[in-house]
Amino acid sequence: MNVKRATYGRLVDDVIKHVEQEIAKGTYKVGEKLPQPQLLQESLGVSRGTLREALRVLEQMGLIELKPGVGGGAFVCPISLEPTTQSLALLIRHRKVSLAHLAEFRVENESVMVSLAAEKATPEDIQKLKKLLDKSEHYFNKGFFPWSDFDKIDEEFHMILADIVNNPLFKVTSKALHANLHKHLEKISWNEGFFIESYQVLQKIIQAIEDKDAALAYNITRKHVRRFYQFVIDYKLNNDDIIEF
């Protein structure tokens, strides 16, 4: 092993960890500029090349943005879902995550999230869910319910649930899954029966949440998500060129 190279790599990692920790502690706040490179080099005891490489990696991680020119520098970014979304997209693209894997995960993830929402929902939360139900009904009354409309309602429903549960991990996973999965499903020839069934299930889930019946909300969701993905998996078997998983 090249000892010099190994030492360089460790120094880069040390700088990355230091900046991460300072951002986590709030020393470096979102939108603020990191100290001048020379000051960072001196305080951390590293070379200019080591610092430059560490900042490049931090930018790739989405923690900072490097701006050139007068007034430029390294600025702290807001925490973004983009790296998670991109990582999942790569896993799907390179077939490291299959449709069956996603189905299995969503069955468990969404069922638990819904049951927690039933335990935690306030009257204000219920009103938000009922407004979403009214929006769904509006689409049905038009007599036409395209995938794009269903997609928007589905995403909004899961974001409301994540807010009710008040657990950022549910929001992160729901956002990343939605961004990467639903664009693949728009090519399916969904029939009217699917949308009617989905609307009826939405009604039942919201009622279970309002009744604070966590077990019922869990079971309804689990059954519906499993049924949904079984349909998608069966469809893929007959249309492998249409759904790219």
Image (tube, rainbow, N blue to C red):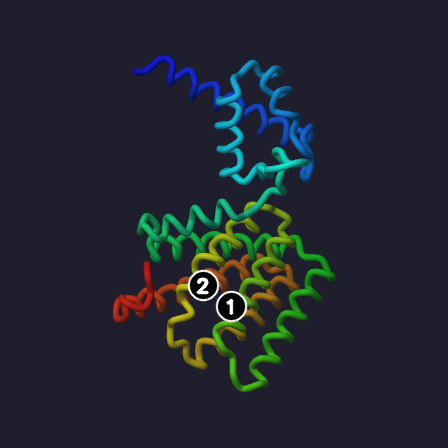
Mark 2 or mark 1, earlier in chain: 1
Image height check: is 16 above or below 103? Answer: above
* Mark 1 burial class by Cα count in 10 Å: few <14, some 14-19, many 20+: some
Image coordinates of residue 238 in percent, x first then y, are 26, 71
* Mark 2 burial class by Cα count in 10 Å: few <14, some 14-19, many 20+: some
Q: Mark 2 and mark 1: span between their CA atoms?
A: 7 Å
Which residue is pictured at 66% across the width and 70% down the height? 130
Which residue is pictured at 58% across the width and 16% down the height? 44
Which residue is pictured at 57% across the width and 45% down the height? 80
Q: Secondary structure at mark 1?
A: helix
Q: Find the residue positioned furthest to the right.
A: 124
Q: Quadrant of residue 38?
A: top right
> What is the total number of numbered labels drawn onto the structure image?
2
Disc 2 to disc 1: CB gap under 8 Å: yes
Image coordinates of residue 42 in percent, x first then y, are 61, 15
Q: Secondary structure at mark 2?
A: helix
The residue type indicated by label 1 comes to: Asp
Tag of residue 182: 2
